[in-house]
Amino acid sequence: DVKVTQSSRYLVKRTGEKVFLECVQDMDHENMFWYRQDPGLGLRLIYFSYDVKMKEKGDIPEGYSVSREKKERFSLILESASTNQTSMYLCASTSNTGELFFGEGSRLTVL
Amino acid sequence: AQSVTQLGSHVSVSEGALVLLRCNYSSSVPPYLFWYVQYPNQGLQLLLKYTSAATLVKGINGFEAEFKKSETSFHLTKPSAHMSDAAEYFCAVTPGGTSYGKLTFGQGTILTVHP
């Protein structure tokens, strides 16, 4: 069974903390993505990667960075968390079939 | 550039009634279109996709959607709603090719099914 695994389902952090969200896929997909989901706004693309050590900005990259050191792992980093980054974060991967496979999401609360 | 508009943030139907979720898109190139479903506390799951083959696309769980270029629409339908269809539904568009996965999503429609 194919799988995208996000390491933390729920996190609570304080303003200014550094936050790491980890995502691992077992499908040998080249392409990986981080989306943010907010009520009434749908999903918005933060960053994506088409290859190891490669990254590209999505629509809302400000305040975020990413790391892809291995093909199966794509990490989202919040250097200094702020309250407006409280959200649901969704990782996804695809192998150019057009279908995104999503993880179950990481719900982050920044106090 | 592309965009997606889902008409109606909430849709409520009775069990057994027709489900119609509306999606309109804009795209500067021929689009690939998708419908995803999200059940509570889960990630998104693909329902169906249009990638320039047949304009009527059948998906899982009895859902289907019709691509209408003249109306720039990709509405999702199901003839008879079931209680298990209650979820949030997202329409998405991408220009395809090397942009696979770089989807633009609509704001979502929450479907409620009444007994």
Image (cartoon, coloured by chain):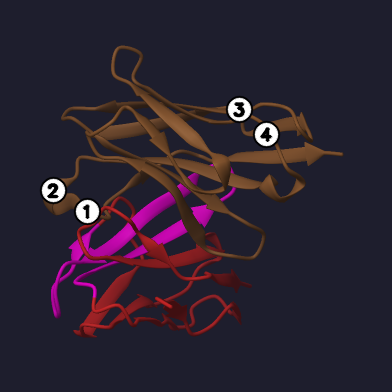
Chain colours: A red, B brown
| Foreground label between 4 and 1 | 1
- Residue at 30%, 50% (x, y): give it: A59
Residue that label 3 marks: B8
Sequence order check, earlier mark of 2 and 4: 4
Label 3: few (<14), some or many (≥20) within 10 Å? some
Please say if the residues under marks 2 and 4 sit with CB atoms less than 8 Å apart: no
Sequence order check, earlier mark of 3 and 1: 3
Label 2: few (<14), some or many (≥20) within 10 Å? few
Q: Element type at marker 4?
A: strand
Measure the alpha-carbon separation of dots 4 and 1.
29 Å
Mark 3 belongs to which amino acid?
Gly
Q: Is residue A34 above or below residue B47?
A: below
Q: Chain of mark 2?
A: B
Please determine if labels 2 and 4 lie on a single subunit.
yes
Measure the alpha-carbon separation of dots 3 and 1.
27 Å
Judged from this view, the residue extending furthest toward the right is: B115
Find residue B100 and name its label: 1
Measure the alpha-carbon separation of dots 4 and 3.
5 Å
Judged from this view, the residue extending furthest toward the top is: B70
- Residue at 48%, 66% (x, y): give it: A89
Please say if the residues under marks 4 and 1 sit with CB atoms less than 8 Å apart: no
Please say if the residues under marks 2 and 1 sit with CB atoms less than 8 Å apart: yes
Mark 1 belongs to which amino acid?
Tyr
Query: Closest to the observer: A21 or B37?
Result: B37
Find residue B97 and name its label: 2
Please say if the residues under marks 4 and 3 sit with CB atoms less than 8 Å apart: yes
A28 left or right of B85 in image: left
Measure the alpha-carbon separation of dots 3 and 2.
30 Å
Q: Element type at marker 3?
A: loop
Q: Is residue A48 above or below residue B47?
A: below
